[in-house]
């Protein structure tokens, strides 16, 4: 399964969610949608 996160590095919730995904052992596809 591929995990994709639309990530905003300035958002604490987005950073926390990315950290939780990585702690679960998955390496998500990160799309920084504000760039």
Image (cartoon, helix red, strand yellow):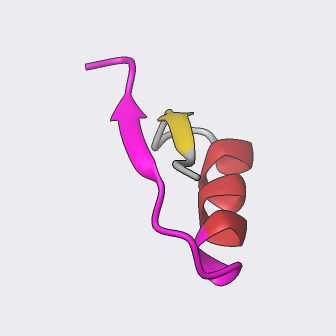
**Is residue 13 shown in magenta?**
no
Residue 16 x, y percent position in the rendering: 70, 60
Left or right: 22, with 13 as reference point: left
Q: Nearer the viewer, residue 28 or 18?
A: 28
Q: Is residue 29 above or below residue 35?
A: below
Q: Residue at image x 58%, y 53%?
A: 1
Quarter occupied by residue 19: bottom right
Query: What residue range appears in magenta?
Result: 22-35
Q: Is residue 21 above or below residue 31?
A: below
Residue at left 36%, top 17%?
34
Q: How many marks?
A: 0
* Residue 35 place in picture, x, y as percent: 25, 19
The percent coordinates of residue 9 (x first, y second) are 46, 43
Residue with the most extreme front position: 1
Q: Nearer the viewer, residue 19 or 3?
A: 3
Query: Which quadrant of the structure image shows residue 22?
Result: bottom right
Q: Residue at x 61, y 39 (%)?
A: 11
Q: Is residue 5 above or below residue 33?
A: below
Query: Residue at coordinates 66% horizontally, 65% vertically from top-left?
Result: 21
> Compared to 12, does 19 lie above or below?
below
The residue positioned farthest toward the left in the image shown: 35
Q: Nearer the viewer, residue 24 or 9?
A: 24
């Amino acid at each position: 399964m591929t995990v994709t996160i639309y990530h905003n590095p300035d958002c604490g919730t987005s950073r926390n969610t990315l950290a939780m995904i990585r702690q679960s052992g998955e390496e998500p596809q990160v799309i920084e949608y504000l760039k």
